[in-house]
Image: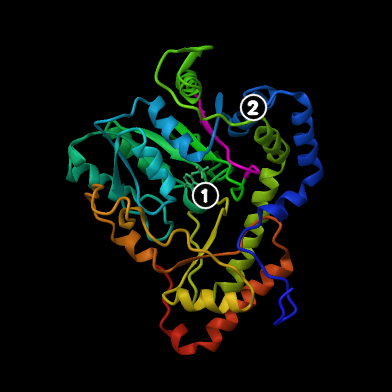
């Protein structure tokens, strides 16, 4: 409880609280796995792979160590490697670009759409046309990120990618269960990478990831690569790595998967309440593309006075976060060395204005109202500041 106001603090995300919501089932799943005596690549992983790929409506799922590895392994299964160029966005978790670079390929960064924060198809097309050999490498694939739970414009992106002969990976780390015209994230491209980091819409209680595809030969390649390149036990057919989803995490994910759609519906209810509470305020609310069932991994608002808004909410014991404050191309590890043939003007603008409000399924209605009131109070008590705020176009 806050000393100041007598309210409990509101976190921005709370995997611990979400766990307690399903504690009995998760604890039973962990106990069952511990009692089984089998901890790596056993029945739990096999069952989860089958259940999650069935949820997606895809033929194959391969459990891996985390989402970063899922991006790398998806690309490696597609044959991406040194000398290749892979188009992706700079406005993403750095993990997307880490996964691309670990294949030996060159990440080529393109801009995002101002309203949806996902890959701008026009920027992709411009980048492809502007430089046929970005960084001296041969264009091979696109990694699309369904950021914050919103599906990117896959119809356009697939059209542009196919016309240029590019393969497509969907980074679905933030979009478990999101749909566009009923078609679920992960089923648009050639292969899809998922993360089960604890705060994700489907989160483990540790690290976890999965590669999903309808192509059995791609899945077989990921299965080899995730375990030392083994085709047969103890015999490496290709140089591989160790990136296995473990049995305990798979069992936990099996316990939580039946609640994913319900949890996403709760996220959408919270988002709808934020929309109606904040829609008339000076803070920009998220745009949802027509036909998209947003998974609201994050609820991201926009203000040119973001720091003041965050400080005011912090003062009321409400946590916020910025996803992400520094785009990949401006981070010390990457600055000045990744091609960006179409420019990144929108990315550089949005990163200074975005802020993620509290968003997780076990956030209570009362807490949502407190967040709304806090934002409105801030906007009203800073009229000069608020007058200068602009909603994103
Ligand atoms: C868009 C995106 N891609 C990839 C990842 C990487 O996932 P992980 O942290 O499981 O490696 C994350 C999560 O951090 C993410 O948000």
The quarter of the picture where residue 244 lies is top right
In the figure, is residue 229 to the left or right of 329? right
Percent x, y of residue 36: 76, 24
Disc assigned to residue 45:
2
State the quadrant of the C terminus: bottom left
Q: Regarding mark 1 in the picture, which secondary structure is present there?
A: loop
Query: What residue is drawn where x is 51% and y is 76%?
Result: 309
Percent x, y of residue 345: 28, 61
Query: What residue is drawn where x is 28% and y is 50%?
Result: 123
The quarter of the picture where residue 390 lies is bottom left
| Count of numbered tags | 2
Query: Label 2 neighbourhood size at 10 Å, few (<14), some (14-19), many (20+)?
Result: many
Q: Which residues are magenta?
A: 202-214
Disc assigned to residue 291:
1
Quote the CA–CA distance across marks 2 and 1: 33 Å
Percent x, y of residue 44: 69, 27
Q: Earlier in the sequence, mark 2 or mark 1?
A: 2
Q: Is residue 35 magenta?
A: no
Q: Nearer the viewer, mark 2 or mark 1?
A: 2
Q: Is residue 212 magenta?
A: yes
Query: What residue is drawn where x is 21% and y is 35%?
Result: 137
In the figure, is residue 111 to the left or right of 52? left
- Is the distance from the Cβ of mark 1 to the nearest ligand 1 atom less than 8 Å? no
Q: Regarding mark 2 in the picture, which secondary structure is present there?
A: helix
């Amino acid at each position: 409880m806050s000393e100041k106001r007598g309210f409990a603090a509101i976190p921005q995300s709370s995997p611990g609280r979400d766990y307690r919501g399903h504690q009995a089932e998760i604890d039973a799943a962990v106990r069952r796995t511990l009692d089984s005596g089998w901890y790596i690549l056993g029945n739990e992983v096999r069952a989860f792979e089958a259940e999650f790929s069935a949820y997606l409506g895809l033929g194959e799922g391969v459990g891996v160590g985390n989402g970063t590895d899922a991006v790398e392994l998806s690309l490696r299964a597609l044959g991406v490697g040194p000398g290749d160029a892979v188009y992706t966005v700079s406005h993403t978790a750095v993990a997307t670009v880490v996964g691309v670079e670990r294949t030996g390929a060159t990440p080529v960064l393109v801009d995002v759409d101002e309203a949806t924060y996902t890959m701008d198809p026009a920027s992709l097309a411009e980048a492809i046309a502007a430089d046929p050999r970005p960084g001296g490498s041969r264009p091979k694939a696109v990694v699309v990120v369904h950021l914050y739970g919103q599906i990117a414009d896959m119809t356009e992106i697939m059209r542009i990618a196919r016309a240029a002969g590019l393969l497509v990976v969907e980074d679905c780390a933030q979009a478990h269960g999101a749909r566009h015209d009923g078609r679920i994230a992960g089923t648009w491209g050639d292969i899809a990478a998922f993360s089960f980091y604890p705060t994700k819409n489907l989160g483990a209680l540790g690290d976890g990831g999965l590669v999903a595809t309808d192509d059995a030969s791609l899945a077989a390649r990921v299965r080899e690569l995730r375990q030392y390149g083994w085709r047969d036990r103890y015999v490496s057919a290709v140089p591989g790595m160790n990136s296995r989803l473990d049995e305990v995490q798979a069992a936990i994910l099996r316990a939580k998967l039946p609640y994913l759609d319900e949890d996403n519906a709760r996220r959408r209810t919270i988002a709808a309440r934020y929309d109606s509470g904040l829609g008339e305020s000076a803070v920009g609310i998220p745009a949802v593309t027509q036909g998209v069932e947003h998974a609201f991994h994050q609820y991201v608002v926009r203000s040119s006075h973001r720091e003041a808004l965050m400080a005011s909410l912090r003062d009321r014991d409400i946590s916020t976060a910025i996803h992400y404050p520094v785009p990949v191309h401006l981070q010390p590890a990457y600055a000045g060395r990744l091609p960006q043939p179409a420019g990144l003007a929108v990315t550089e603008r949005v990163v200074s204005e975005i802020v993620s409000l509290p968003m997780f399924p076990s956030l209570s209605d009362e807490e949502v109202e407190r967040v709304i009131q806090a934002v409105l109070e801030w906007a009203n008590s800073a009229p000069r500041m608020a007058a200068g705020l602009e909603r994103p176009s």
